[in-house]
Image (cartoon, rainbow, N blue to C red):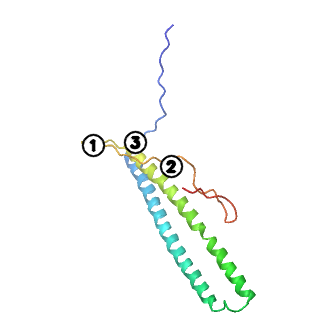
Amino acid sequence: MEQASTLQTAPAVSLPVNMVADVQDSLLMALTDLQRLVGLLDHATSNLLERFGNAESALAHLAGRDNEDLHVIRNQLQQAVTELQFHDMATQLINHTSLILQGCAWRLAEEAMELEGDEQPLRLDPMPERPSPVTQSEMDSGSVELF
């Protein structure tokens, strides 16, 4: 009894090239916006750290006095600086999302558009295999994957 060989193929969807190009452009615009967001976060965090340093210096002249308010203020400033790790987590999440968007944009281009003449295929960076590096959903709990 002969068995007919059946080739399994993945389902395919035919899309107009201009639609694929529009989606790719939108993904790249989102990527650009995310990169701008990282710049804004970096700038705000830098300013915030500078202001914390200035506040700490301004409090230094009170250091010789035994003042309970001074200890409370310094403790609050130290806790606020510690909470600035939010910047690091947000940046990791944005970078991870940027890699996914970029991978999608280039994959669309590779799949939808044929190579011309002596054009070489894209050597794409693989999309991240692991889920987001940041699992924290609020400032008081969660974890950050260090890499």
N-term-proximal mark, 1 vs 3: 3
Type of the residue with mark 3 = Glu
| Residue depicted at 47% across the width and 18% down the height | 5
The residue depicted at 67 percent of the width and 66 percent of the height is: 139
- For mark 2, what is the residue? 128
Q: Secondary structure at mark 2?
A: loop
Say if 82 sits above or below 9 in the image.
below
Q: Which mark is residue 65?
A: none
> Residue 74 or 14: which is nearer the viewer?
74
**How far from the left and from the top, in percent, is residue 106?**
41, 49
Q: Which residue is mark 1?
A: 116
Residue type at mark 1: give it: Glu
Q: Residue at x 60, y 89 (%)?
A: 58
| Residue at mark 3 | 111
Q: Position of residue 74 (x, y in %)?
A: 67, 82
In this rendered view, identify the residue nearer to me: 1 or 47. Answer: 47
Callout 1–callout 2 Cβ contact below 8 Å: no
